Image (tube, coloured by chain):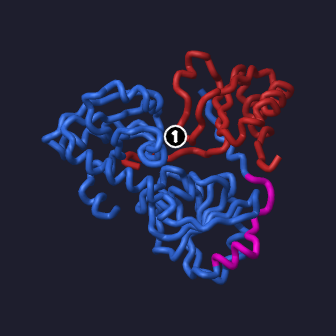
Chain colours: A red, B blue
Amino acid sequence: MEYDLELDKLIQRIKEKNHKRIIIQLPDGLKRQTQNIVNEIKEKTNAEVLVWMNSCYGACDIPLGLSQLNIDLFAQFGHNRFIRKEGW
Amino acid sequence: MDTIFIDAKYNKEIKLDESALKTLNKYKKIALFSSIQFIKLDTVINQLKSHKLISSKPDRTNAQYQLLGCDIFHENLKLPEEPDAFLYIGDGLFHPRALLLASNKPVIQFDPIANDHKILARKDIKDILNRYKSSLMKFLSSRYIGIFITVKPGQQQFLFSKKLEKKYKDKDFYYFVGNNFDPSSIENYSFIQSWVNTACPRISLDDSVNYSFPMVNINDALEAEEVLKKL
């Protein structure tokens, strides 16, 4: 694997906050890692892991409506926090 | 809801090969950028110490040298001075094309995975720019304008888009709201003569090959005549 997926950091956060249901969002280039990521989180935590199926163009592209599914943690891979500014 | 971002950084050393260095030797002042995956640039910076390296942190980024796909406007790059060329470290064309849109200067893209580099120039996006120029002209001559607003928090610019009504009092503006931009749904509103995009600015540029109606970005629409003169 050429990229550091920092699963230890993610797993630590899940354990610390006792998250029960999480969702991961991956850009296209990392989508093939989905099975490994889901399996490792499930093995090491008690959290249920959902996968966002659609686009992941950046930190500006966070899925809407996740509250309907009672998600405790949203994890986006491949980007970091986006500082919002109007007018591009 | 708790939120975490995982950078997924490339975990091997990033080092320019001889061929890339030879290309870069043609330029004295080089502005260096990368996506967040390839931001570990210590070796590259050291390799370029005989050049004048220009470093910046564009507006919406979190790290020095980081580039986002929406950094297509020169002022967003926050360059302390104008480079002779850009060096972009990373794979794919999405980010280096942002630099081509933001500047007339050549962009050298070094892909650390392929260990290969490409030299990109403004002519490589000529078709995109020609279509965009045509869209700007159509916007200026249109009366009925559709404004696309996304509800994605990172891209939603509804209040900002209201500036158009103040600037263009001779046009009628209609506001269309959605999650994602879908060209097929836009084609249902045939009374709209021209569209303004307030979501990701690349929709109006790179994606314009996928639709046939004119669409321009909100900030270009606000200064359409001035932007046209530069294209």
Residue name at image x 55 percent, y 33 percent: A62
B169 lies above or below B91 = above
Quarter occupied by residue B230: bottom left
On whether residue B13 falls in the magenta region, the answer is: yes
Q: Position of residue B158 (x, y in %)?
A: 33, 35
Residue name at image x 80 percent, y 58 percent: B12
On whether residue B176 falls in the magenta region, the answer is: no
Q: Position of residue B3 (x, y in %)?
A: 62, 34
Residue under mark 1: which chain is it in? A
> Mark 1: which secondary structure?
loop
Q: Residue furthest left?
A: B170
Residue name at image x 61 percent, y 16 percent: A69
Q: Which residues are magenta?
A: B10-24
Q: What residue is pinned by disc 1?
A: A60
Q: Residues within 10 Å of mark 1 (few under 14, many from 20)?
A: many
Q: Position of residue B27 (x, y in %)?
A: 58, 80
Specify whether B147 is left or right of A63: left
Q: Nearer the viewer, residue B47 or B115?
A: B115
Q: Position of residue B187 (x, y in %)?
A: 36, 29
Residue name at image x 55 percent, y 78 percent: B29
Q: Nearer the viewer, residue B62 or B163?
A: B163
